[in-house]
Amino acid sequence: MNLIEISKKIGSKIVGNEKIKISLLSSINYPKKNSICLLKNEKYLKNITFNDSLVFLVNEKFPIQKYDGFNFLISDNESLSFAKLAAIFKIDSYSPKKIQSLKGSIITDHIYIGENTTIGTNCSFGSGVSIGSNVKIGSNTNIKNNVVIEDNTIIGSNVFIDSGTVIGSDGFGNVLDKNFNWVHINHLGSVIIGDYVQIGCNCCIDKATIDNTIIENGVIIDNLVHIAHNVTIGENTAIAAKVGIAGSCSIGKRNLIGGMVGIVDHIKTADDVTISATSTVNKNLTEPGTFTGIMPISDHTSWKRIAFWISKLDKIVKLLKLNNF
């Protein structure tokens, strides 16, 4: 579609070349030609080279006058407009077919595999496995009963995925419209899983909004773990049961994450970090070490006040000692 058609569909205004042909959405981290990028913060433009076929979707308060020659779609609610765009560009390519046999791998009854999917040698699949279209699975991979692998997922070799796990589900991306109704953002990215990864029962790994959710080589994941959209898990990290990692987190290499840990969105952890069980992680962990974050629940204003003074306790104690208290 050209930009004029798109602007009418999402109710936005064009500044720039309205005749651009748009073929996809791309992320601000990896902008592509003939695409639309959601741009929420001006700072991201510092590292972007001008491209006459790239369009930025921005809020009407964005200072477009500073970027002469750039192409913009201007909206009063850029997140809602992005949700509408994601619905336009969503492609349902999944058209499963039953596979009776596959050379070099064991296929039991009730296995469904979509179009253009490739599977390596010496793989095995339990009953009730559903694999979407355009999926790639390496050799020596073992996928147990009732696992769902959605379209465009890439899984490496020597991977083990236990029963009931879903890989490539839509992320929890939603935006409120002016009537306070939730509008879901269709996720157009995928999941990439490296080699020698182990994933337990009933886990959920969401595909990215635009790019990829990435699980690197050697990661081991216990049962009942949720990994949200756009997350990256560094190699040889271990994640215990009931952990929830929110969107766009970047977990370092060789992290040890205890059971029932909650990590809020956009958090980054260094390599060789250990997080104690039941901790809440709400700030970046920039150095190796062991970290614990446990606080009783309270109203947010009280919690901020208490947390502030707790963070100062060591300084208060030193001051008291200096004054012989």
Image: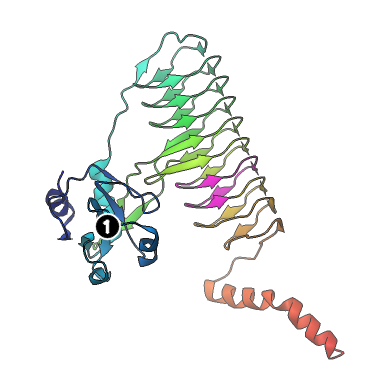
Dominant SS of magenta comes to loop
Q: Nearer the viewer, residue 151 or 244?
A: 151
Q: Which residue is mark 1?
A: 56
Image-based side of 150 in relation to 141, left or right: left
- Residue at 76% in and 76% down: 314
Residue 222: percent from left, percent from top: 63, 38
Query: Can residue 181 be seen?
Result: no
* Residue type beneath disc 1: Phe
Quadrant the N terminus occupies: top left
Q: From the viewer's side, name the closer residue of 17 and 259.
A: 17
Residue 139 among those drawn in magenta:
no
- The part of the chain drawn in magenta is 228-251
Q: In the displayed structure, does residue 167 sit left or right of residue 94?
A: right
- Residue at x 32%, y 49% (from the top left corner): 185
In the visual, does 143 lie left or right of 33?
right
Q: Is residue 139 visible?
A: yes
Q: Residue at x 24, y 46 (%)?
A: 34
Q: Is residue 191 left or right of residue 274?
A: left
Q: Nearer the viewer, residue 101 or 38?
A: 38
Q: For the C terminus, give its image quadrant.
A: bottom right
Which residue is farthest bottom?
323
How many residues crowd around disc 1 within 10 Å: few (fewer than 14), some, or many (20 or more)?
many
